[in-house]
């Protein structure tokens, strides 16, 4: 695909998969909060495991930090989100608890940005495609 090496291809496929999962998840989240998000939202957080493994592969494969940082940031974001949503079971979305929202959104945006930005280093059209298809805010 586009003359990419295997590690670039791995990153591109994972970045698009990640973005598609977030789009579907956030589209279902508000409408089906009780029946979907509370039961299955942890699966989105669990994707941090393959993300971290892919980041390790990219790191050991010699890719620059911008390619592997996203998976490690996702691991931190997912751990925080899982702790807030499933361990402590905080009600923080309604009403908004700013002490939870700020770190949650910061970690989410940092994660997503490190899946978007490195795509620009690989292919400007791929980068533009992910920007045009980006997901909604995480709360």
Image (cartoon, rainbow, N blue to C red):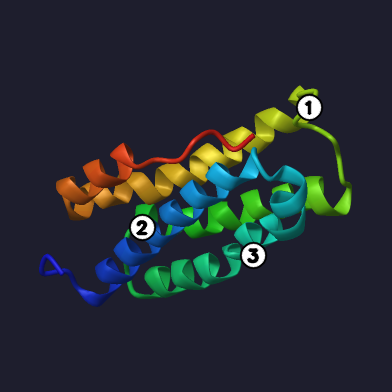
- 131 over 101 or under it: above or below: below
Q: Quadrant of residue 137?
A: top right
- Furthest toward the right, the residue is 88
Residue under numbered circle 3: 46
| SS of the residue under disc 1 | loop
- Marks 1 and 3, how far apart at CA: 24 Å
Q: In the image shown, does 102 or 25 lie closer to the viewer?
A: 25
Residue under numbered circle 2: 16
Rendered image: mark on residue 94: 1
Rendered image: mark on residue 22: none
- Furthest toward the left, the residue is 3
Whole-percent x, y for residue 68 in the image: 42, 60
- Residue at the (39%, 64%) spot, across then down: 14
Q: Quadrant of the N terminus?
A: bottom left
Residue 43 in view of the camera? yes
Whole-percent x, y for residue 103 in the image: 67, 34
Q: Quadrant of residue 11?
A: bottom left
Label 1 or label 2, whichever comes before in sequence order: 2
Label 1 or label 3, whichever comes before in sequence order: 3
Q: Quadrant of the C terminus?
A: top right
| SS of the residue under disc 2 | helix
- 28 over 61 or under it: above or below: above
- Marks 2 and 3, how far apart at CA: 17 Å
From the viewer's perspective, is the residue at label 1 or at label 2 nearer?
Answer: 1
Whole-percent x, y for residue 133 in the image: 34, 42
Residue 69 in view of the camera? no
Circle 3 residues within 10 Å: few <14, some 14–19, many ≥20: some
Label 2 or label 3, whichever comes before in sequence order: 2
Judge left or right: residue 86 versus residue 14. right
Q: Quadrant of residue 62?
A: bottom left
- Residue at the (76%, 32%) spot, across then down: 100
């Amino acid at each position: 695909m586009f003359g990419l090496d295997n590690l670039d291809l791995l990153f591109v496929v994972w970045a698009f998969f990640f973005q598609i999962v977030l789009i579907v998840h956030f589209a279902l989240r508000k409408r089906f909060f009780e029946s979907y998000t509370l039961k299955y939202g942890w699966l989105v957080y669990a994707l941090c495991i393959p993300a971290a493994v892919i980041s390790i592969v990219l790191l050991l494969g010699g890719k620059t930090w911008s390619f592997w940082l996203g998976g490690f940031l996702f691991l931190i974001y997912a751990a925080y989100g899982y702790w807030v949503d499933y361990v402590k079971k905080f009600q923080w979305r309604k009403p908004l608890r700013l002490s939870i929202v700020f770190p949650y959104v910061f970690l989410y945006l940092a994660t997503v940005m490190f899946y978007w930005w490195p795509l620009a280093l690989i292919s400007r059209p791929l980068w533009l495609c992910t920007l045009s298809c980006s997901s909604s805010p995480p709360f």
